Image (cartoon, rainbow, N blue to C red):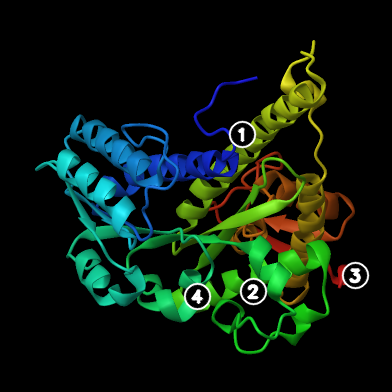
Amino acid sequence: MTESGYQDREQSEIKHYAIRLYLEAAARILGSKYDIKYVDCCAGPWNSRESDYRDTSFGIAFEVLKTTRTELSARGRLPSIECLFIEKEPEPFQKLDAFAKQRSSPEIKVRAENWDFAEHIDEIVRYCSTRGAFPFILIDPKGWKLAGISQISPLLKLKPGEVVINLMSSFVTRFVNDSATDLSDLLGEDFPDLRSLSGTELEFAVVRKYCDLIKREGAFSYVCALPVMKPDSDAFNFYLIYATRHPKGVEVFKSVEKRTEEQTHLVRADVQLRQRQEKTGNFELFDAPVMYRERKYQQLAEDNRVRAKKRVWDLLTASDEVSYDNCWAEALQFPAVYQNDLRDWLAEWEKAGRLEVKGRKKPTEVLKRGCDHSLLLLPDSR
């Protein structure tokens, strides 16, 4: 069993793991071209157990950006990096402000504001709109209302820019059929189709609908959703919604998703081991992963592979010729679906004589995004 400062809040450990991986990759890539503005709209700190706040989203972001600037400077690139950390509640803000003042320097400017971020959207937009800057926006509210589309619309429309939002899916699905709870800002004005669903179908539909609204409102090309499980039960707690306008962002985020999936199972295996030991008082001979039990994530992956495969097939039947890149973009926006899944489907259809792949330089060439591969359904397959 591994030791962690996140005991009893392992969902935060998984979330922070994903945020760190994403920001490490994205900042290196975009910092070579742009200056960076990083905004944490609901920074906290909440339940931090570390004096240097390395177990908080803002503490992680600062360290990642500091390291990134050092790495970029070694390559002759010195981007301007600025952080804006926002917190509404007075007590945590005092800690946040002290952190910002202690860490701020000419190399990385750090600023904290005691704001309800939804009431200061215009200031945030102005902060992010410096010429030559690329803003990263993290919206991680304690509830769901601050994730509403109308609340965050101006932040979604920042160009360039990327956004990560914590969607409390477990709460939303619980109240879809509650007429006293207004979810229109998350799911649109009319969502009767959702009220007829339940279980995993409802959860998928809620997340998908929110992603579609984010995509439309911010004119994003791609919106992905990374599921975060509850540490002590076989259920999802929330989803990290990621919006980008560039396929490279999807590549990065899907890599983050895959590694986070693996980390999730390790973390949850440790929780299960600890619970068994607390219940029985016995130590176990096997490592935690050996005894790990989980079904919910496997079911999500199975269901989404079916959904994504159908979506790709629909694309192929709707057009004479479809680029591999378009199929890739559609498939990979489904949680727990990866490029190897897409390649397997295409290989299956090609072997069955239903599909022709064009643009290969040789028959064994692996299909990749950006290589001008295209897909053509054969006449008898329609």
Q: CA distance from mark 4 to mark 1?
A: 29 Å
The secondary element bearing badge 3 is classed as helix
The secondary element bearing badge 2 is classed as helix
**Residue hosting label 4:** 148
Front: mark 3 or 1: 1
N-terminal of the two: label 3 or label 1? 1
Would you say 347 lies left or right of 170 here? right
**Residue hosting label 3:** 380
Q: CA distance from mark 2 to mark 1?
A: 27 Å
Front: mark 4 or 3: 4
- Amino acid type for the residue under numbered disc 2: Lys
N-terminal of the two: label 4 or label 2? 4
N-terminal of the two: label 2 or label 3? 2
Q: Position of residue 238 (x, y in %)?
A: 61, 56
- Amino acid type for the residue under numbered disc 3: Asp
Front: mark 4 or 1: 4
**Image: 53 above or below 179:** above
- Amino acid type for the residue under numbered disc 1: Gln
Classify the position of the C terminus by image quarter: bottom right
**Image: 356 above or below 181:** above
**Residue hosting label 1:** 263
N-terminal of the two: label 4 or label 3? 4
Mark sitting on residue 50:
none
Mark sitting on residue 209:
2
Residue 284: image quadrant is: top right
Q: Are marks 4 and 3 in contact (CB under 8 Å)?
A: no
Q: Position of residue 359 (x, y in %)?
A: 62, 54
